[in-house]
Amino acid sequence: MSKTPSDLRYTEEHEYVKETDDKSVVQVGITDYAQGELGDVVYVDLPKVGATFGRMDVFGTIEAVKAVSELYAPLAGTVTAVNPALEGDPALVNRDPYGEGWMIKLRVKNPKELDELLGSEEYKKHIGE
């Protein structure tokens, strides 16, 4: 059974959104379930700071031994930070997806979009847990 923290929001595509101290900025990564399905992550291709995305736009790719998958922006916004640690150690996504393995921070364009994401119980149902 994968970890699904109750304080996060989720997409059906297995990204999570974590609120930060700045209410207009969220941290985005992939869920514990997703990293488990992918297997050993060997490369993560992320956007540059300042890139802007609409909701569900592809913001990057994640490459594992088994497959390459696209990463989707759970909310519309502008990238304010990219996790530099993933460049040298992409397996952080496997070891700590909700902590050190985060991918981008996004300044949210429309905070109401947060309400359209799945809560932890809805996400658990979505993944069959």
Image (cartoon, grey):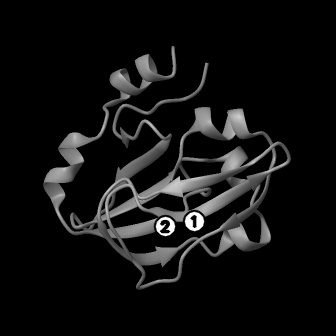
| Farthest-out residue, left | 112
- Measuring from the top left, give residue 7's x and y in whole percent: 33, 38
Tell me the residue at 55%/58% (across/down).
Answer: 102
Q: Is residue 60 left or right of residue 65?
A: left
Q: Earlier in the sequence, mark 1 or mark 2?
A: 1
Tell me the residue at 36%/68% (across/down).
Answer: 106
- Measuring from the top left, give residue 55's x and y in whole percent: 32, 58
Number of marks in the image? 2
Q: Is residue 103 above or below residue 94?
A: below
Q: Secondary structure at mark 1?
A: strand
Which of the two residues, 82 or 75, is positioned nearer the viewer here? 75
Query: In the rendered view of the protein, which quadrant contains the N terminus?
Result: top right
Which mark is drawn over residue 60?
1
Query: What residue is disc 2 on?
Result: 104
Cα gap from disc 1 to disc 2, whole angstroms: 10 Å
Tell me the residue at 49%/67% (across/down).
Answer: 104
Residue type marked 2 = Ile
Task: Look at the image and tell me whether residue 129 can be seen.
Answer: no
Q: Is residue 129 above or below residue 90?
A: above
Which image quarter: residue 25? Answer: bottom left
Marks 1 & 2, CB-CB < 8 Å contact: yes
Task: Look at the image and tell me whether residue 112 can be seen.
Answer: yes
- Measuring from the top left, give residue 45's x and y in whole percent: 66, 69
Residue type marked 1 = Gly
